[in-house]
Amino acid sequence: MRDAAPLTPSKPPLGTLAWLVTRDANKTIGSGMASIELLRRTLEKRGWLDDLEHGTLFAVSRFTPGTNVLAYLAALGWSYHRIVGAAVAVIGGSLPGSVIVTILTAAAASVDRWRSVRVALTVATLVAGGLVLANAWSLVRPYVRGARVGWTLTSVALAAALYFSGATPVRVLLVLAIWGMLTPPRTAS
Amino acid sequence: MSLLLLYALLLKASVTSFSGVGALPQIRQDLVVTYRVMSDDDLSRAVLFGRSSPGPVGLYIVSVGYAVRGVPGAIVGWLALASPAFLGIPMLALVRRWLHLSRLRSALDAVIIASATLLVPSGILLMRDAVAQLALFVAGS
């Protein structure tokens, strides 16, 4: 098997990766996708990730059973440091939150007992929603600016039509994969 | 309930879902209905804790594990949550190996675009719920 090297030339050291994943993946409440957007921004700013590579990792994570965010982190960590990187990224992205969840459950605390806490959680959810939309834009951006704008818009319309007709996300992705396979770009001869 | 069985049940629910809360129906069926080791209230509280904590929404599985078997159950819940994430690595290796094929590249592009499209309703729903909640806070103050 050909070595599956990351598409970007440089990679973060393992310790830096662990720190960045732990920091960014545990910064948002209400949506793990928002965490991915924060992490993407951090890694792209430092030249360790680009939009296309992010898109590849994201697509694979959507087809992986279980929590998409952790699948993304495993794929990201593996791209940089193989299995150790994957383990470090998954642990960094899930352990702090797991400890907090366990403490909350153990204390049987009702987090919505205090109004200020409820307001803070709601604002955090609002921000998370915005980050999810930003993530959607970062995924589609390379295609909107590329040579296949018409094909991209058709793909968006097809995915939206399937979604709003009640198809499950996995079915939407499968149908779009087939659509993409049947409509490859024309190569210049 | 043994830790091994708890892990198997939570792993089954986790592996057969493709989103954070997608495993909820299976967990309810197994732990609330079939084995009766937790109540619907416990499950609702677990989801609330999962949504109120940083990180993936799927972290409620850790809370479910704790509700069933205490700290060892929480560890088992975390393992059941984290282990399926590694299933994507062989897929990523295969995708990268064959990425030079135009049809596979095009299929991947279409999946990426579909993923982005599917994110939009989720983001809008999150924001809409938050705005509605904030409006209630303002009206109530």
Image: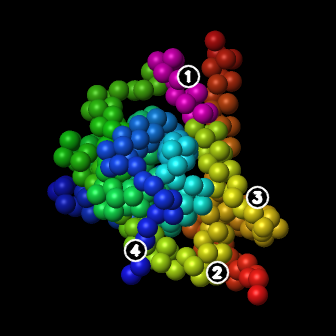
Image coordinates of residue A95 in percent, x first then y, are: 31, 43
Residue drawn at point x = 64 percent, y = 56 percent: A139
Q: Are marks 4 and 2 on the same chain?
A: no
Label placed on residue A145: 3
Q: Amino acid at mark 4?
A: Asp
Label placed on residue B86: none
Label located before the other in sequence (4 or 3): 4
Residue drawn at point x = 38 percent, y = 47 percent: A17
Which residue is under mark 2?
B102
Which residue is under mark 1?
A119
Q: Quadrant of residue A83?
A: bottom left
Chain letter for mark 2, please.
B
Among all residues in the image, which is located at the extreme top?
B141
From the viewer's perspective, is residue A116 above or below residue A72? above
Label placed on residue A3: 4
**Mark in front: 3 vs 1:** 3
Image coordinates of residue A80 in percent, x first then y, are: 39, 58
Marks 4 & 1, CB-CB < 8 Å contact: no
Q: Secondary structure at mark 3?
A: loop
Residue drawn at point x = 52 percent, y = 53 percent: A49
